[in-house]
Amino acid sequence: MRRDDGTLTGTRHRWIFGGRGCSNQWVNTERPGEPDPERPRSRKPEPREPREPERPEAREPERPEPRAAEESEEPGERGRPIGRRVLLGTLGLGALGVLTAPTLQRGMESFLAGASEKDPTGLTGLLPNGGGFRYYSVASSVPHKNETNYRLTVDGLVDHPTSYTLADLRALPQTRLVHDVQCVTGWRVPGTPFEGVRLSHLLDAAGVHHSAGAIRFTCFDGTYTESLTLRQARRADVLVALRMQDKSLGHNHGGPVRLYVAPMYFYKSAKWLSGITVTEDVRPGYWENRGYDVDAWVGRSNGRDDEPTS
């Protein structure tokens, strides 16, 4: 229906398209009071229940797939191959070190030992050599003894005082012991072989008196002394040593003869041994008179807890 102002209301209209040369015109097709079947009815939206927000599922973080070593390496990260000359040179230096090491060690030992004899301060004893030993001497100088002028005397409370030459001692039954050497100052040399005559053998040969209870040791440096109880001296691991590290005892290590007391700190193993005197009671030695323990068991004396050596 057309109003006075020209608008259409409440009517249904359609465009009628004519053929070629025909014009398009509006046609009213709606009946009064009848809904338009082509026009969708408006419906009120039905109320909806509020939905909970979706929670994202927990996913494990994606792990990058491992790449082959060839892919992960950047240019220049791989080691540079060494040349044949470098390899041969390295091997040659290693072989040279093996061949010269014993000579260098002997030279170092000789140097430190000679310096210690002329060092009244004893500071050279703080310097280690290649074999792990330090050299200590309480005398300003120590004379050298050999097969022609060395003597070891056994006297005191015995029935048969005796004097031994090097040849005499070498002719007696020899015992070889291998134990660690532990110094009371802390250094330790593992698996050190000593070889010589058991002290108990010399005591038995001399005939110890029943009143005896201890042994006093003197040295040909003129200063150093040591002591053991008679029971300690008769242990199987106490030697009058002639060899050390499978060679004759050199002067620097207290040769040609020294005492070796395996289970005690090394200051009990007196160097340059020259006298064994049987006494009634223990007489403290050089270091005992300066505060060291008389019974110097490794790990059980001098305030130390080192592992036992025998």
Image (cartoon, rainbow, N blue to C red):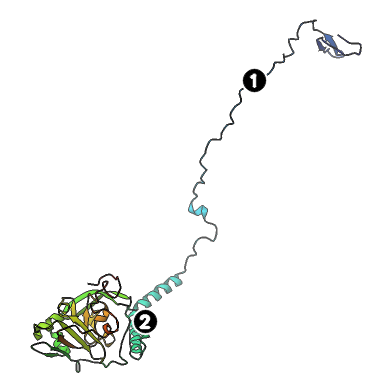
Work out whether residue 138 or residue 157 is closer to the camera in this orientation and state it: 157
Q: Secondary structure at mark 1?
A: loop
Specify the quadrant that holds the N terminus: top right
Work out whether residue 283 or residue 169 is closer to the camera in this orientation and state it: 283
- Residue 146: image quadrant is bottom left
Can residue 142 be seen in the rendering of this structure? Answer: yes
Determine whether, in the image, residue 11 is placed left or right of residue 273: right
Assess disc 1: are there few (<14), some (14-19) or many (≥20) residues with their C-alpha within 10 Å of its C-alpha: few
Residue tagged 1: 47
Amino acid on which the number 2 mark rests in the picture: Leu
Residue 18 in the image: state x and y as whole percent. Answer: 83, 12
Residue 273 in the image: state x and y as whole percent. Answer: 21, 87
Q: Does 179 sit above or below residue 283?
A: above
Specify the quadrant that holds the C terminus: bottom left
Q: CA distance from mark 2 to mark 1?
A: 97 Å
Amino acid on which the number 1 mark rests in the picture: Pro
Residue tagged 2: 126
Q: Secondary structure at mark 2?
A: helix
Determine whether, in the image, residue 192 is placed left or right of residue 17: left
